[in-house]
Image: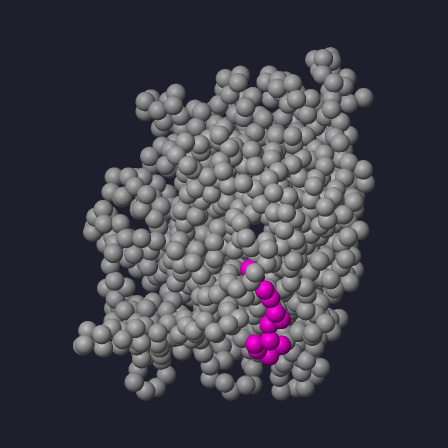
Amino acid sequence: MQFLIKGQKHRHRVVFKRRAMTGSDPSSSASRSVEESLHGDTQYRQPYLAGPSSVGGEEAVEFVLSSPRLATMSTKTARASMVPDLFTSLPYIRDLLNTQSSQIQEETIQECLPFLSGLEPGAIYNDYGVPHLERKRHIQFLHKSLKKLPAPYVAADASRPWMFYWALAGLSALGEDVSQYREPLISTVRPIQNATGGFGGGNGQMSHLAPTYAIVLALAIVGGKEALDIIDRRAMWKWLGALKQLDGGFQVSVGGEEDIRGAYCAAVIITLLDLPLELPRDSPAWSGEGAILLTGLAEWVRRCQTFEGGFSGLPDVEAHGAYAFCALACLCILGDPHVMIPKYIDVPRLMSWLSARQYAPEGGFSGRTNKLVDGCYSHWVGSCWPLLEACLDGPFRSFAGGPRPAATKSLGSLYSREGLIRYILCCCQDRTRRGGLRDKPSHSSDSYHTCYVLAGLSSAQHKWHFNTTETKTETSGNLASPYQWTCEPFVGEEQIYNEGDRVGTLHPVFVIPEGAAEETRAYFASKGGF
Amino acid sequence: MGKYEGDPEWDDVVPIPQDDGEGALAQIAYTDEYAEAMGYLRAVMAAKEYSQRVLDLTEHIISMNAAHYTVWLYRASTIFALNADISQELNWINEVALDNQKNYQIWHHRQLLLDHLYPGISSDSAALQDLTESEIEFMTQMFDEDAKNYHVWSYRQYFVRKLNLFNDAELKSIETLLRTDIRNNSAWSHRFYVVFSDPKHSTSGSRATEHDPRIPDEIIDREIEFSKAATFEAPQNQSPWNYLRGVLRKGGRKLSSQECFANEFVKIPEDGEEDIRSSHALDFLADVWAEEGKTEKADEALRLLGDKYDRIRKNYWDWRRGMLKEDEVTKAVEKVELGQ
């Protein structure tokens, strides 16, 4: 779900020296990193989406930080002391053998440390050594991403609908009213829909599940009859039938690849639009034996769990963060999390792999074993946790349902919310006039990262519950499970960010503002048939 | 005047302009060259034209935007309709792929080409040999740029399956990559696939996370030794630890069969400070000890992980500690029930 636009390469030199921490905590990993001088000089990969419209990201940045000592109480060191040493020092155990993987990992740590340590020049930190969310700048950045884009964005010509979704989901999370986009969105997506069902990347392009997913969600976000009525549901249903494969999965387009994105996107579309589950007769998966659109889908998803415990894009490939979310969210559409996840997934192995995605000192998530942290996994990995927590905790009951043994429960958090929030607020924000959020400090912000970093932040700041006693009307009928989630602010541990920096909620399965999915589903359910 | 507008060969085609809708969001300011070419593509697609000039047109568009699935899919249909030369096409997309490292579409296109090509050469061993060599060579070139490129690895798995390359040469070529970077987890994952999905000695449809009784003991032993040797090079490298767990699961063996090995990296004396060279070894031993019913030892290992060696994952380690207690309760209940 990523794409690249060729942009200028960025050089970013950070020289960071650290001296002994004077703290005497024997468990402090600082003992290993004392007296170490860390040097980084890295030429970074190209950012995911860096158009020439970028402001502030193009010039070479160079700054040198001298060695702060905790003994001398300068303002800088006072700030540094507010940050737990977990986020300012190297991992406790490191191997001597140097390979490309360890080298770029080392460079990434060095790149992040000044930001995590409260030492970014010009930044204002709170009492926990965490900077504010630059809400206004990120809002501006996303508004701008919906305006006319310059020619190099041609590389996004087939994935442009994602831009609508990323901006609208991100703006909603930031508390912006997006109703101003209802009319333009309607006239934008109308010529992108094909008479044969589904949406393409643009006018005249073949229908594809990824842009269709993005457009359906964007329409659900702006909401309203006029927006939702744009979608030709009968044609959509026929087209989904054409994508359905005999092995249970979905192709992303007719003749295109079959992968777990297809499984998740198809499930989202079927439930949100309340489509019939019958298989159209001309589907390649039609067998005459009662097969439906969902036949074998959960089994297909299960085949993507790898020996490491995570999920691959299709069976037999390497476990990857983005696909873990697709797998879990797909299962949570097909049924209740505490039923579906243990039924189809080896939960302890998944927990082990998913948990290993969080690194220190960075605090953020990586997408694969021995790969680097990247802000977008704040969502792809981070948003797996509410689904898994619901799986372990069982349904949240408002009446006496008999408590399960406390030990199996998720204890409120299965990962370090603090670590993720620190990575997001310290390392992922472009605090220049450009605004937006990013992969890591050396990368330019883009709307993909802005959306998914904010989704991860939202997830870390809230606690989701899966309810079985909810009696909303939209929970009746097919695939009703994803409409049974409720949310509250997470207040389980010391809050390291200012209350004003709490972002809005995004649904744990659909990743759109709370309530939008329920309204969309209710609207289509009320129609009864096409 | 545009390239196509001024070309007599295209006189019969009326280009279809893009309908972006009024006041479209995130509208892209196309270059005239791109806008014109796309106009002609929409027209030939609407007319379902499959011809040499369509191949030229799609090549032109791909040179401006390689991430355009519609163009790729239509190009594939055109190639098959014309029965065009597949190896020539493969050579051309090699160049495109090297310039577009993160591109999804090229690799799917390549699979479509192979699917089309394969039936015609499946009984010609010399042709298969040539294809194998050229494809492996090309992938090696791609791995030189990025040894963890997800699309190339997905294609590699497809290729191994298609040409039945579950063999020593394939294992050797993974080992070459691992010698360069023992932390290349993509290479480890591929090895797992090549070893445990080999139709000669695996059960068809056996999932990656389940025991496969068809795998011979000597293969399980060989893979255990392979992961151990790698672990000694860099004990904190998680890849071979995950691999080892995967191998033991496939072989239906207990983790405790590797207790001695994991203990190489973990020294916890009765008193005095412990010496831990790998947090993954400690994690492994926690499971071993839980398996053996040594709950206290397991709990101590998990506590050390959460408090000292892997603090960012403290909540996870605490959850594991909770699981230990629950297992104990379950076992106690079972005992009582048996006693009755």
Q: Is residue A292 above or below residue B219?
A: above
The image position of residue B181, as x and y in percent, is 43, 53
* Residue name at image x 56 percent, y 44 percent: A270
Q: Give whichever of A481, B283 is nearer the camera.
A: A481
Q: Is residue A313 above or below residue A487?
A: above
* Residue name at image x 35 percent, y 46 percent: B193
Q: Is residue A397 above or below residue A23?
A: above
The image quadrant where one finds the C terminus of chain A is top right
* Residue name at image x 24 percent, y 42 percent: B201
The image position of residue A122, as x and y in percent, is 75, 71
| Residue found farthest to the left | B339
* Residue name at image x 48 percent, y 24 percent: B87
Residue A372 in view in this figure:
no
Q: Which residues are magenta?
A: A484-495
Q: In the image, is B137 to the left or to the right of A475?
A: left
Q: Quadrant of residue A174?
A: bottom right
- Whether residue A389 appears in magenta in the rendering, the answer is no
Q: Give whichever of A218, A220 is nearer the camera.
A: A220
Residue A168 in view in this figure:
yes
Q: In the image, is B251 to the left or to the right of A132?
A: left
The image position of residue A474, as x and y in percent, is 59, 53
- Whether residue A494 appears in magenta in the rendering, the answer is yes
The image position of residue A512, as x and y in percent, is 64, 55
Q: Quadrant of residue A516?
A: bottom right
